[in-house]
Amino acid sequence: IGGSSKSDSSGVSNSGESSKESSRCSTPVLDADRTDRLRDKMKRRIESGDHWFSLEFFPPRTASGAVNLISRFDRMGSGGPLFIDVTWHPAGDPGSDKETSSMMIASTAVNYCGLESVLHLTCCNQTKEKITAHLNKAKRLGLKNIMALRGDPIGEDWVEEDGGFNYATDLVKHIRCEFDDYFDICVAGYPTGHPEAESYDNDLRHLKEKVDAGAHFIVTQLFFRAETFLRFVKNCRAIGITCPILPGIFPIQGYHSLRQLVKLSKLEVPEEIMQVIEPIKDNDAAIRSYGIQQAVEMCKVLLASGEVPGLHFYTLNREVATIEVLRQLGLWAEDPRRPLPWAVSAHPKRKVEDVRPIFWASRPKSYIYRTQDWDDFPNGRWGNSSSPAFGELTDYYLFYLKSKSPKEALLQMWGEELMNEGSVYEVFTNYITGQTNPSGHKVMCLPWNDDPLAPETNLLKDELEKVNRRGILTINSQPNINGKPSSDPIVGWGPAGGYVFQKAYLEFFTSSENVTALLQVLKKYEPRVNYHIVNVQGKNITNAHEMQPNAVTWGIFPGREIIQPTVVDPVSFMYWKDEAFALWIEQWAKLYEDESPSRMIIQYIHDNYFLVNLVDNDFPLDSCLWQVIEDMFATDQITVT
Amino acid sequence: IGGSSKSDSSGVSNSGESSKESSRCSTPVLDADRTDRLRDKMKRRIESGDHWFSLEFFPPRTASGAVNLISRFDRMGSGGPLFIDVTWHPAGDPGSDKETSSMMIASTAVNYCGLESVLHLTCCNQTKEKITAHLNKAKRLGLKNIMALRGDPIGEDWVEEDGGFNYATDLVKHIRCEFDDYFDICVAGYPTGHPEAESYDNDLRHLKEKVDAGAHFIVTQLFFRAETFLRFVKNCRAIGITCPILPGIFPIQGYHSLRQLVKLSKLEVPEEIMQVIEPIKDNDAAIRSYGIQQAVEMCKVLLASGEVPGLHFYTLNREVATIEVLRQLGLWAEDPRRPLPWAVSAHPKRKVEDVRPIFWASRPKSYIYRTQDWDDFPNGRWGNSSSPAFGELTDYYLFYLKSKSPKEALLQMWGEELMNEGSVYEVFTNYITGQTNPSGHKVMCLPWNDDPLAPETNLLKDELEKVNRRGILTINSQPNINGKPSSDPIVGWGPAGGYVFQKAYLEFFTSSENVTALLQVLKKYEPRVNYHIVNVQGKNITNAHEMQPNAVTWGIFPGREIIQPTVVDPVSFMYWKDEAFALWIEQWAKLYEDESPSRMIIQYIHDNYFLVNLVDNDFPLDSCLWQVIEDMFATDQITVT
């Protein structure tokens, strides 16, 4: 597996080059693939002989299931799938704006997780208008690929309608007719023939029709023997189907799920598999282990055949078995190089985005959400940050911005009862150190950080612990970096052979007393340290230019312009400030009863503390920001005395 | 004198900040002043108490005089004048496109020398239409400031015309009326009264009228005593003239020039000066020395008075005396910090330009000339480098692109008679080393380098000498730099407190045999070294992306985005290639007779050599480019053997 084989859906491409017209600085186009279509990606991967994989998911039933599925997208996305696909659940209002709809899940995968995504769409019992509306909506949401299916007719006595959608072929034709070449289209293939088809050959002819109508590739129904698939491919080729045919792989994950699937798909499980499974049917671990082994062996045969450019996995929304199979096949990209320090969105409109404010570093989905209406990412950045029109906080409760943890877990982490501001300092400190709190729970997240400490932040752990203990409540930070290789496992990003740089950054809440001392101290650090200090009312103290962003992360690469993906932007900081203060109330204070002491403590902090960010511009030297804090505490002492 | 006092006309401002609307990366706006008007610059300097100076020149009579004057602009511009002004010579077709016209000289100062410039304009005996046409042309050429004068009537029996331009006031009103607030307007003041005025008081009232009509500042006629000027300022203020009044300083440079000037201006030289000068009237050096001393002393009194924000020098197109006076006053900015590695044009259209291809580094005027029609410098760079519409080489003979040296001097430097290609290698080598050639002349310039080696290139002198001796004919190079302070006297640029970086760059002509060996060698240096190799027919061999520029100079500064002012741009390289090859013929071959052996040697090189550029992307390591050349020679040896 070459380097580029891991690259497509994660947006990384070391060797790929841009076909862009302009050679502007701020469109460095790290990843040519961002402008490419799924079919082109497949074509290149076939040509280079790099095998790929793709992952199928179904929409969750509940909002919390959606939050979990999206976390899974993030985790499984890191392995480098070429695409994921989301099934269409006609019974679940699949085209709606509900957080659990097929449409919204696929949109989230594209926009927030940066995954190339295929949306399933079934057509039977649907009007043309309805289908067109779905497709328009999908297009608007940034979806570029459709899996065109007939779907299961409702009821037993289904009859074909004249001029209606009776077959997937009709849907393919409709998509082509109404949307020309906009969507890449996938259709389903049945290695043993569609259960309702008159015959295997007849079904093959139907498949040929679908492809001729304008489909770009085929994903097959699951099967249990490599030879089943290979015979099917041979037969497809024989009747002139030339597009990629991807085998649907189903690692057996349990006895009951297998039986259910077999029933639904009207497939027969081969005798040799049943013989192994039946005796161990109550031993989940043993079945799962067998399923993995069976899938790995079958996939090896498929890949070795030369007929299989990529593998399509039916994940059943689970990750362990699929990842294990991919690991054993060497297809799982353990540590994909990041094209930029933040995850690149797969929405075509955002494909040239190449710089973001640092403030949302731990809340990238919030940033994407709040900037989703920006039509304009000229040169990959906000059009005009003086009027950036961030999405309102009133839309704030969007499901994927909520904490993944239930209320009880949050209370266990952040304290059932707060005694004073010091209790809050302790929560922050425990989050940094990873130590358990008095009630025995680890603080795994904070309102501003939904995940444990980033590896990079870990570099600053000792200093962070020290200052959080004393009421410097840090929510974002990065160390200074003076030219580490772009391949560095912790701080590296971008193409091979480059160097990455950072200015030290520290962002925290702290009391107004501390701010008074801090301002005195900062005079000594002019112009080395830039600061923005703001409270919830918007009182804003800064020594930075009111419009000019400060680049705090940049990279230098062979044969390219400079890339500066992260900036401290004074204008967007004021938008972030609103969000950062609101998180105190929305995520923390509201865990407690109205008027309760705990709630009042958080409310007090919200009302009286300042949000501070500091940049040490002198990146080649050791960061002076810790010394700034030390000096601040020393000044505090004097003031008190 | 504070740091910012030296900054205006050189475009440098360390403390100034941008008032730009956008916060785009590629518009870092190092220099707020670039967007400012002359009157605003004066206002800020007055407020900060930073004294300035300005320089007056007159148009030269000959084309070679123009070439010399422009060199003088470059030299005197480096001292940091707030502006220069160019007088209007009604008898010399001043508004024409002739290289010696007032209009073209002022335009050259703005566009090619990056100097804030004031164009004089006289109005008597001119139609309104003609004046408006001049002003429109000036505006189109990037001129933003006009010195509005009446000018000398032709003939003795001049009578006022009704509705015509009889006084400078009429011209000021006309400019305001036709061009609103576009131009900053300067008018002349006469410390001893205009020679034709009825009275001193009457003249003062005329001046008041000119200012009231819309002038922004006053420059005075020369005078010989500080008290003359100070009384004049007092009288101006008394009648309500509040704008800046700049004293015209005339350092006496010779007996005859003084007498001539006195005659023309109808001024009286004070007795105390005549008494000193008369006895030494045949000793030029003594008079010049006295003139400097006299001017310095008078200027000191003026500056100390608190009434004088800046000094205006009548240079008579000479530089020694004026520079000496300014040096003694501490107003000459010996080593002004560069805002960017190349001189910034003062044309308002180009004010956001912040990146250029490296190829024209030694021919910046050619670059400005060839890109002068680019309306669009979005984000300070070319609109679309895939169709950059460089000016044609057919316009190539523009006077300021010609060598400053006459043909005889060029022949002395480059050889009256060339024996073989080796003779050419020798010329290149002598240029690098600064040693005299066999005929006893130093090679001060080459067709691609009109000036002696830059201090930065000097850092590479030994290596350059070695390779030029062996037929690597270098025309452009820079060392790698891994984070030197922006204040570094040799390689520094940009605001204080920053760091500058470079990738090593080498550009040279060499034989096709060398190129064959080089290409073999370069395989070992992938992807560390990017190369473009091209011959005059356009055969183009490269391992770089066809559109993507490679940033080879960049800077990191406090509170700013990254600045990357120099790139190796593949598209513009093909335009540069045409120019670089043409210089062999136009500047060198044509020195010799048709069919002469010398000419045929240059023609052979032109027809058969390749132009090569190499970038070592691994800037933190020692440059590998010298090793690449070494390896190439070694491979050559093997091939020959």
Image (cartoon, coloured by chain):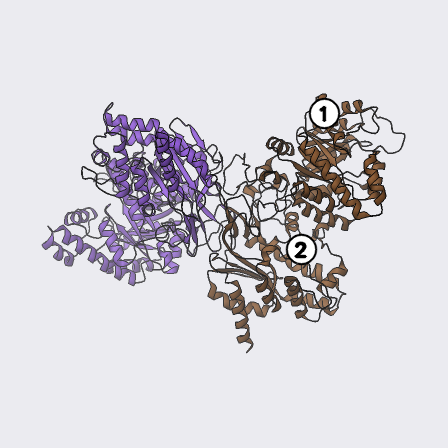
Chain colours: A brown, B purple
Residue sitting at x 54%, y 34%: A19
Q: Quadrant of residue A229?
A: top right
Residue B415, compared with residue B176, is above or below; it is above
Percent of width and height locating residue B624: 41, 43
Q: Is B317 in front, or is A43?
A: A43
**Residue reaching furthest right?**
A157
- Does label 2 or label 1 sit earlier along the sequence? 1
Q: Quadrant of the C terminus of chain B?
A: top left
Which quarter of the picture shows residue A277? Answer: top right
* Horizontal relation, residue A128 to residue B356: left or right: right
Q: Which residue is mark 2?
A: A451
Query: Does A610 sit left or right of A415 as displayed?
Result: left
The amino acid on which the numbered mark 1 sits, given as a three-letter code, is: Lys
Tell which residue pokes out farthest to the top in this image. A239
Residue B357's image quarter? top left
Q: Is residue B132 visible?
A: no
Nearer to me, B287 or B118: B287
Q: Quadrant of the N terminus of chain B?
A: bottom left
Camera-nearest label, 2 or 1: 1
Residue A617: percent from the left, percent from the top?
48, 57
Give the total number of marks visible in the rendering.
2
Against B596, residue A398 (above or below) is below
Q: Secondary structure at mark 1?
A: helix
Q: Residues within 10 Å of mark 1 (few under 14, many from 20)?
A: few
The subunit carrying tag 1 is A
Q: Residues within 10 Å of mark 2 (few under 14, many from 20)?
A: some
Type of amino acid under label 2: Asp
- Real-space CA distance between mark 2 and mark 1, rounded to the nearest whole angstrom: 48 Å
Name above or below for residue A544 compared with residue A72: below
The residue where tag 1 is placed is A234
B179 vs B174, nearest the viewer: B179
